[in-house]
Amino acid sequence: MQPRTTTRYRGKLLIILGIVVSAALLYVALAGLSIERLAETLARAELWPWLPLAVLAYLAGHWVRGLRLRVLVSREASLTTATGANIVVMGYAVNNILPFRMGELARMGMLYERTGIPFLQSASVTALERILDGLTIVLLLAFSMIFVTSGGWLTHVLAQAGLLFGCALAGVLVLVVRPRWVVAATSRLAGWLLPGRQALLLQMAANITAGVAYLRRLRDALKIASLSVLVWLLEAGMFWALMPAFGLEADPMIALLAMSVTNLGILAPSTPGYIGVFHFVCMQALVLVGIAEETALAYAILVHLAFFIPITAWGVGVTLWYGVKLSATLALAKAARNARQSTSEGAFELRSIGRLAPHEAGSLPAPFLVSITRALVPLPTAGLSEPEHEHAVAQAAQFVQAQREALPFKLRVLLTVGLFGFRLATALLTLRPFTALSPAAQRRHVNLWAYGRIGLTRKLFRPLRSTAILAYYDIPAITDALTHGTPDPAQTGGGSP
Amino acid sequence: MKLATRPRVLVIGSGAGGATVAATLAEAGLDVLIVEEGPQVPPTQYGLGSPEAMATLYRRRGMTPIEGPVPVGYVEGCCVGGSTEINSGFWHRTPPEILLRWKARYDLADASPAELAEHFQWAETELAVGLLNRPYPKSTELFARGVERMGWSAQEVPRAVRDCKDINRCASGCPAGAKQSMSQTLIPRALKAGARLLPDTRALLILKSGGQVSGVVAEQRFPDGHREQVSIAADAVFVCAGPTETPALLKRSGVKFHVGNTLRIHPMLKVAARFPETVDAHRHVLPVLQVKEFWPEISLGGAYLSPGHLAMNLSENWLETHPEMHRLRNFAAYYVAVRGTGRGQIRPSAFGENDTSISYRLSDEDHLNISRGMARLATLLLAAGAEEVFPSVHGLARIRTELEAVRWLDERVPLDALALTTVHAFSSCPIGENQQRCAADSFGRLYGFHNLFVGDASMLPDSPGVNPQGSVMALARRNALHFKESLE
């Protein structure tokens, strides 16, 4: 067999195995149960307020995951918590939809893309997060078993999981505490086995050790450990919040137990979204503490829905948004490669990719903006006629309009929303549109917002008043009126005496 | 690095850094193309009022606010010559203390005062850097009087100006051609040496494959309004689009390693002062003295004044202060600038066509220094004879006495009352050998790339504490020469 065929064969085998395991466990879960009673139990579940609370707890846990990721890479890159959460959630969503835990790869890729950290380092960070997750779950399982139950298959699960993640932790500790050993060992082994690739392997080793570098200080390691515990406590919160939905006593230790066992259980191969495995393991955890099978399975179904739907929706949204941006960039790069028609600038060739429509020309200020501008600039002063003042107001309003259009999109939207709020508020107070008020009334309302006690309204009006005032006073007729017409040396060509 | 024997070098941006790189490499015999996003503004359109200048010379007509817990007003140039067309022309060499710091924290190689001296000297000769060649305007005299009475150290800051006409048009392009901006000096020099210039051409994307850059995609605007996207092949690309647009372009192009995460600024607080005598500050060049007594944390100096700018200064307490506009002729404007130990970020905005999101978080130290700086500046101006001092602080319309001023040495001005501005931004793509902090090596080559470089204020490792043009030009020249040597 050719290697590629072998890989595809193995892949198909794993998918089939996953489906078989999921189907088998679903069958076992349902075996001996009354489907009618199960459906009845589900129908009777009190979703409000428990389901929203559960989803909230679960989403909060992902926010904390984002925070943990941000902290883990903080020495190498600057990541916001929001972006960190998006990266994590995208990974989980892909795991829910595609097989082979492709979400982990997606997560590494997005971390690499968002931060510029080398890919292997990103992989190291992702692997570290998963090991920390596993360890935390094992510890929380052990803790819950003190209070709830012990013995039987749970002890077996705990022992095996403890061994697995314990070994992984040992590996991480070596990378953290003795990175030079790792690099030196890599250098020796590479020099012996693959001398031609020694530099590359050394680079890889350096990137992998860099991925766990944040844990080198005890204080920082404890911070990460605390965040990991918080993540899984919030996830347990989801399990806990759904218990009253089925009339179960909301025992936090049972919730902790169910959460730990379920998350360890889904390490087994299954379909995307852990169908079957999730339900079976969660159900068994509850049956172990004396909950009826139908209730336990109904509970597991609801927990799985709360687990699956919000994160998949969030992750798909992130993937689509990110995909659209990435596609636009790739499309532009591709079009550049395929461009044919060219002109030259000396030694440089300019190849035309495409013609674009002109930018829209700026618009004239609406009466509302003219009124705002008039209210922001001072009343006509001595030395300035009314027509001159009105002309100055019109000029200033045009400037304000142009400046408003030049604002970055986000701020433009915020300003528009804020001005809508202003118009609405004044209309409600006066029962008339702003433009129908007298100039004196307009000025009163504008002053209240632009110079009043509420910081938010002052912030809203700051760009408007700054631009209106700047434009107004820089109009030569206004300056002349202020300086009583004394000549400007710049106009007469002279400097200071 | 292996490039063609006569590589084509694309320089994105024509400001202090871009013009320096372009002129240096063109005179070294390389093929250079400068793409500049902004227009080439004829001198006849220089020296107009602020609204006209903002429309033609400033990025987004000057509407490039820095977001954050305390928003900061920020402007940068977007025209041939970049921000050098609208700045005051003040010139500083990078202080030795700062260079040492850059060496210690960022491992910036080959950048000692002695090693940079020849590059500073070159730039100072090119730009005719020198002191004001005429009697001080009144606003400077008053400031000097205050300095003397306080017993503080101060200096006249040299400017890149040849035969200043004292007409106070620095911020709208010098119509007299006295300010030695890039459009007057290095751009013509680069063109004379064979470089090409494409104004109204914005770089949208850097084309790359692995660690190799092959060119850019750019958008050209034509006089009839239509736009065209073009790809431009190059053997090396120097990104000199400014401290905000360089990281934005790099990030959009997938270059992210330590890019856009370490923006630094010099936060400034403007203060207007009214004197009993006529000052006519709006008709004369801005004050040319800077107080160094509290440097590097705090710097005090003179600010540009026009009637509109004075009104903006007073607008934080407008209902109370607007009658002061009738005494325009008695006013002068000054500023407090702090070194800026906070940190900001540059991100391509998620929305809007090619918008850039700029954010900055003022540090506690910045906040303290701004309050103290305001106290000291107000004290100086009152000692100089000012009747009243008007800081750009909401709720603090005026300071009349020294007692009122010195209160702020210990108390902090409320953050949400501050109206801060800045015209100095840098460090968004720091250079140095320390890969835990830097986006590029000591000579501007971005890590992970063979032929992609930064060459503007974004490359300064952190705040220089002084006007940055000198630092930018010296490092840009050094880096361009290093690039040329690497070809040989």
Image (tube, coloured by chain):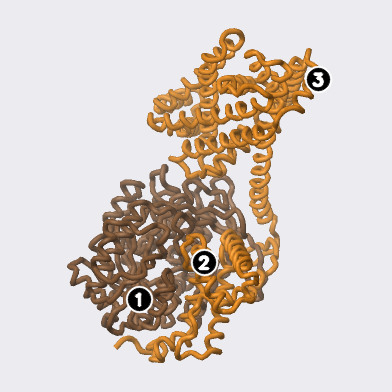
Chain colours: A orange, B brown
Residue drawn where x is 62% and y is 72% of the image:
A434
- Which residue is nearer to you in this view: B347 or A124? B347
Can you say whether B199 is above or below B294 in the image? below
- Residue B205 at x, y = what percent? 59, 56
The residue that disc 3 covers is A35
Q: Nearer the viewer, mark 3 or mark 2?
A: 2
Say which element carries label 3.
Answer: helix
Residue B301 seen in the current view: yes
| Chain of the residue that carries numbered disc 2 in the rendered image | A
Q: Rounded to the nearest whole Å, what is the CA distance between mark 3 and mark 1?
A: 89 Å
Residue B485 seen in the current view: no
Are callouts 3 and 1 both on one chain?
no
Say which element carries label 2.
Answer: helix
* Amino acid type at image mark 2: Trp
Q: Quadrant of the C terminus of chain A?
A: bottom left
Q: Is residue A127 left or right of residue A331?
A: left
Asked if marks 1 and 2 touch (Cβ < 8 Å), the reply is no
Q: Rounded to the nearest whole Å, what is the CA distance between mark 1 and mark 2?
A: 44 Å
Query: Which circle marks residue A366 in the picture?
Result: none
| Chain of the residue that carries numbered disc 1 in the rendered image | B
| Chain of the residue that carries numbered disc 3 in the rendered image | A
* Amino acid type at image mark 3: Ile
Q: Nearer the viewer, mark 1 or mark 2?
A: 2
- Residue A307 at x, y = what percent? 66, 31
The residue that disc 2 covers is A449
Residue drawn where x is 46% and y is 49% of the image:
B261
Query: Which circle marks residue B161 in the picture?
Result: 1
* Amino acid type at image mark 1: Val
- Residue A401 at x, y = what percent? 59, 73
